[in-house]
Amino acid sequence: MEVAMAEWYIEGLYMKNCNCDPGCPCDFNQRPTQGYCEGMIAMHITKGHFEDVDLSGVTFAGSVHWPGALHEGNGEMQPMIDSSASEAQINALAEALSGKHGDAFFEVVAFVCPTVHDPVIAPIDFGVDLATRTAHVKVGDGVLESEVDTLRGIDPPDPYQILVRIPNGMEYTGPNEEAETALAQYIRSKGAIKFETQNSHSTLAFVRHGSDFRNPKFKPTVVEKAFAER
């Protein structure tokens, strides 16, 4: 029985860190630097709703792992939602991000990440500064932690600004369809998905997602083809 799609929308600052070298090849449908993917996302919703539930001010995060390239599937994730959110907001956000209610990005993530661990509801300290390409996140007592700094040259160690722009893409969906590339100084994940990385990739961006954003009920034909060819 098909679930009726709800109407929803979120926008805000977004961080995605992973174990790839800076300039993550997965953004361009290439294989991950290490041959597998482990990382995290976090976002603070500055404006949003799910049906009549206001999601403005809610922060969420999550840890992820794929044994190979993302398009090969078999991934796992653990959602995390800030404990300051109400029960109605927690339930609404979980539905919005489930891939059941449109938005190409979250539909594809749900498709390639079939294992979803129990969510963590805990305080989340999160901040992103796009101008300086710095960011941080800490969930609870250290279930998930990461610090981000700008990329720097070697001699002299001047800050580098590197923008990735993917026209008509499904993840970097801000006004200019672009994201800042930075350096994840470390990622520590101690929940259901455990790993630690140093000096790896970070993406920082302002993004927008919703039920009618970028091809509602997106058909991940590239992913389906990859599954069929295995």
Image (cartoon, rainbow, N blue to C red):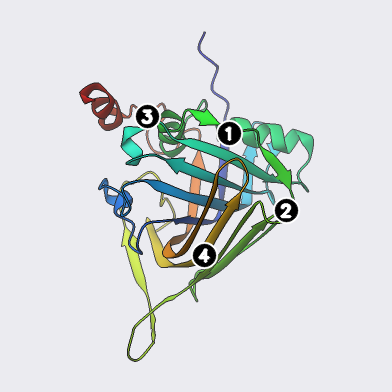
- Secondary structure of the residue carrying numbered label 3: loop
The residues tagged by marks 3 and 2 sit, at their Cα atoms, a distance apart of: 34 Å
Image side of residue 142 versus residue 136, left or right = right
For badge 1, the amino acid type reads Ala
The residues tagged by marks 4 and 2 sit, at their Cα atoms, a distance apart of: 17 Å
Question: Looking at the image, do the residues carrying marks 3 and 2 touch, with CB atoms under 8 Å apart?
Answer: no
Mark 1 Cα shell of 10 Å, populated few (<14), some (14-19), many (≥20): many
- Secondary structure of the residue carrying numbered label 4: strand
Q: Nearer the viewer, mark 2 or mark 1?
A: 2
Q: Quadrant of the C terminus?
A: top left
- Secondary structure of the residue carrying numbered label 1: helix
The disc at residue 96 is 1
For badge 3, the amino acid type reads Phe
State whether residue 33 appears in this view: yes
Q: Is residue 194 above or below residue 119?
A: below
Q: What residue sits right under mark 3 in the picture?
A: 218
The residues tagged by marks 2 and 1 sit, at their Cα atoms, a distance apart of: 23 Å
Q: Nearer the viewer, mark 4 or mark 1?
A: 4
Residue 191 or residue 79, whichever sits in front = 191
Q: Nearer the viewer, mark 3 or mark 4?
A: 4
Q: Position of residue 24 (x, y in %)?
A: 34, 57
Q: Is residue 92 above or below residue 155?
A: above
Q: Earlier in the sequence, mark 3 or mark 2?
A: 2
Q: What residue sits right under mark 4 in the picture?
A: 186
